[in-house]
């Protein structure tokens, strides 16, 4: 990607879907460009949002960048956030949480393979609720239950879940997840 507008559009896309701030080096790596091109894309996107009176803005802290809602819509976003984080979990969210509980730590690609769908939004919502966390293990992004989630289940460790030993090492699940 070398066209400035294409870099800016790609940057906007990755910032939009990222759950957490991205470093400039990660942005350059994802965009397949050098750090100066990545910096120019960030500057251009930031200026575009500022000049367009948009609902989003580019947030910078040190060397990290994130796309955030504009502060003037804080009350509206907070109301939605409360609704997303306090309502009942959907069946797909419960399924994903169960897989993470029994198979975690687990890669997103394994979750997608087991469930047969892209789990990105479900993972985002489970993280917003504080039920799961993303960790880097052996340079891979893995998902596991939070301490708060384990506590709320009334157990002191995931191995206390019913049928944990059987489901954690189930050969059929291993075969499905191993195809990733």
Image: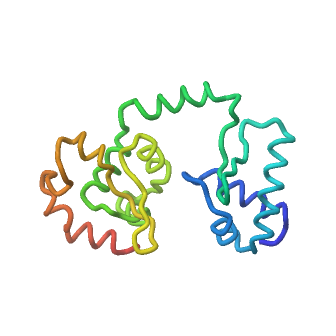
Between 146 and 108, the one nearer to me in the picture: 146
Residue 141 position (above or below residue 148): below
Q: Residue at x 44, y 56 (%)?
A: 117
Q: Residue at x 12, y 56 (%)?
A: 163
Identify the residue at image location x=23%, y=43%.
Answer: 151
Question: 172 or 104, which is in the foreground?
Answer: 104
Provide residue 56's location: percent of width, then percent of height.
71, 40
**Above or below, 148 relative to 106:** above
- Left or right side of 92 for 22: right
Please identify the quarter of the rendering in which residue 173 is found.
bottom left
Left/right placement of residue 72 relative to residue 98 reads right
Question: In terms of image quadrants, where is residue 174?
Answer: bottom left
Quarter of the figure that contains the N terminus: bottom right
Tell me which residue sits at (82%, 62%) in the image.
40
Q: Name the quadrant of the C terminus.
A: bottom left
Residue in front for this viewpoint, 63 or 1: 63
Where is 103 relative to 93, above or below?
A: below
Colouring scheme applied when the structure was drawn: rainbow
Query: Where 80 sits versus 18, above or below?
Result: above
In the picture, residue 6 is in which quadrant? bottom right
User: Residue 13, percent across and down?
Assistant: 68, 55
**Percent from the top left, x then y, of residue 37?**
80, 69
């Amino acid at each position: 990607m070398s066209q400035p507008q294409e870099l800016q559009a790609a940057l906007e896309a990755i910032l939009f879907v990222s759950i957490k701030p991205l470093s400039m080096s990660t942005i350059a790596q994802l965009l397949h460009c050098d750090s100066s091109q990545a910096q120019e894309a960030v500057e251009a996107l930031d200026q575009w949002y500022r000049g367009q009176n948009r609902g989003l803005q580019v947030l910078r802290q040190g060397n990290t960048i994130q796309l955030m809602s504009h502060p003037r819509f804080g009350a509206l976003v907070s109301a939605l956030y409360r609704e997303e984080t306090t309502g009942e979990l959907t069946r797909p969210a419960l399924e994903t949480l169960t897989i993470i509980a029994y198979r975690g730590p687990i890669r997103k690609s394994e979750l997608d393979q087991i469930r047969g769908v892209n789990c990105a939004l479900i993972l985002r919502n489970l993280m917003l609720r504080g039920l799961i966390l993303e960790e880097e293990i052996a340079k891979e992004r893995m998902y596991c239950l939070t301490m708060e989630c384990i506590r709320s289940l009334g157990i002191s460790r995931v191995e206390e879940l019913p049928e944990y030993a059987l489901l954690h090492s189930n050969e059929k699940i291993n075969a499905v997840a191993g195809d990733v």
